Image (tube, rainbow, N blue to C red):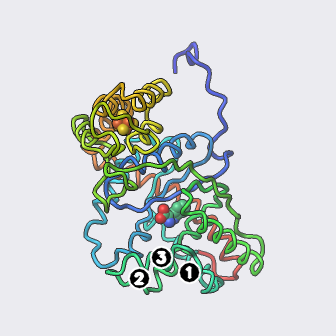
Amino acid sequence: MSETGPATPPKATVARGERRRLLSGMRPTGSSHLGHLVGAYRNWVAMQDEFDAFYCIVDWHALTTDYRDTSGLPASTLEIATDWLAVGLDPDRCTLFVQSEVKEHAELHLLLSMVVPIPWLERVPTYKEIIRQLVERDLHTYGFLGYPVLQAADILIYDAAVVPVGEDQEPHIELTREIARRFNAIFGDVLTEPEVRLTPSPRLPGTDGRKMSKSYRNVIGLAEEEKVIRSRLRTMMTDPARKRLKDPGDPAKCPVFDLHRIFSDEATRSWASAGCRSAGIGCIQCKGALADHLVEELAPIAERRKEFAARPDDVRDVLAAGRAQAAEAAAATMERVREAVRLPSG
Ligand code: TRP
Ligand code: SF4
């Protein structure tokens, strides 16, 4: 700092330790796509200054469904951490870490499992559904049934006040609250009931019009090159009524327009909408304008991703530092919990 003091006065921000604690997690499932950006990352980045934010790569959760072949796990973990840094999660402002590196998650999971009635787990809406969907995997395991208890431990071990998740996860957070209440009723007030913060979930179709998902092979990657983005959009499904240029279309029936809603500005959207209805523009033009906006948002992410991908050891260092921060917070909670349960201290 120069002798005359800083050129700009320090921002009047609340110190990290005084902000409300936030936790969210994501499984390491390989490279991220637009669904992750819209459904999580945009919000996570926005929240890292408002909260004392902890973002966790939940590798143990990945094992609950993919326990047979874990060979891809180390690479997927590094990949998702690289994505997180590329989108702008900043290790100086939030804590980025790997679940399995903080063993206290497992200890709290064990203690919670003592008080969680099995019917609470069997009636989680996703439980039977996923068993039915993934018939090729045997999910009649103890670990898979206990998935939401592990998730509850992830949250409760950090005394998280706020948990930002998509709508599909809401039952898990509600269950976390019920587990905390039950545990507190038995052992005294040791766990903090978290509040759910639903992230907006606009419809985000993939290139074939179905929900964007890796298993449908219809994704646009987060760090895709410009020419790939443009070519993926060129073949993207549109309103089938627009077979020829002179056929008018309906943006409400077009997955491309759903992406305009998320990535384009108001002026582009009204231009596309009017031009589609009047057949004044062609789909190629319409997609070109969308591509411009997508590229504008994704190019800096791709750029940063390339930089971090070239320095995997730096990414590992970020996770190591995050682990130390997370472990400190987790250890404090576990001390309190052990005392309440009358177990020897750690
Ligand atoms: N179950 C979440 C999902 O599939 C991932 C997750 C694990 C999580 N632990 C968490 C999310 C804790 C929020 C908080 O998306
Ligand atoms: Fe879809 Fe745009 Fe074509 Fe209309 S003009 S059908 S909104 S791609």
Q: Residues within 10 Å of mark 3 (few under 14, many from 20)?
A: few
The x and y percentages for residue 160 are: 64, 58
Q: Amino acid at mark 2?
A: Leu
Give the residue displayed 45% in from the left and 27% down from the top.
274
Q: Amino acid at mark 1?
A: Leu
Answer whether residue 261 is visible to the viewer in this image: yes
Residue 242 falls in image quadrant: top left
Give the residue displayed 52% in from the left and 17% down from the top.
2
Do the numbered discs 3 and 1 sit on residues whose CB atoms are within 8 Å? no
* Distance (Cα) linking label 1 and label 2: 20 Å
Question: Label 2: which residue?
Answer: 139
- Looking at the image, is 143 positioned above or below residue 61? below
Question: Label 3: which residue?
Answer: 129
Determine the residue located farthest toward the top in the rendered image: 4
Instruction: Check disc 2 and report its element: helix, strand or loop.
Output: loop
Q: Amino acid at mark 3?
A: Glu
Q: Quadrant of the C terminus?
A: bottom right
* Distance (Cα) linking label 3 and label 1: 25 Å
Instruction: Check disc 1 and report its element: helix, strand or loop.
Output: helix
Q: Residues within 10 Å of mark 2 (few under 14, many from 20)?
A: many
Residue 98 falls in image quadrant: bottom left
Mark closer to the observer (2, 3): 3
Question: Label 1: which residue?
Answer: 110
Q: Nearer the viewer, residue 191 or 42?
A: 42
The x and y percentages for residue 316 are: 34, 53
Instruction: Check disc 3 and report its element: helix, strand or loop.
Output: helix
- Looking at the image, is 149 positioned above or below residue 324? below
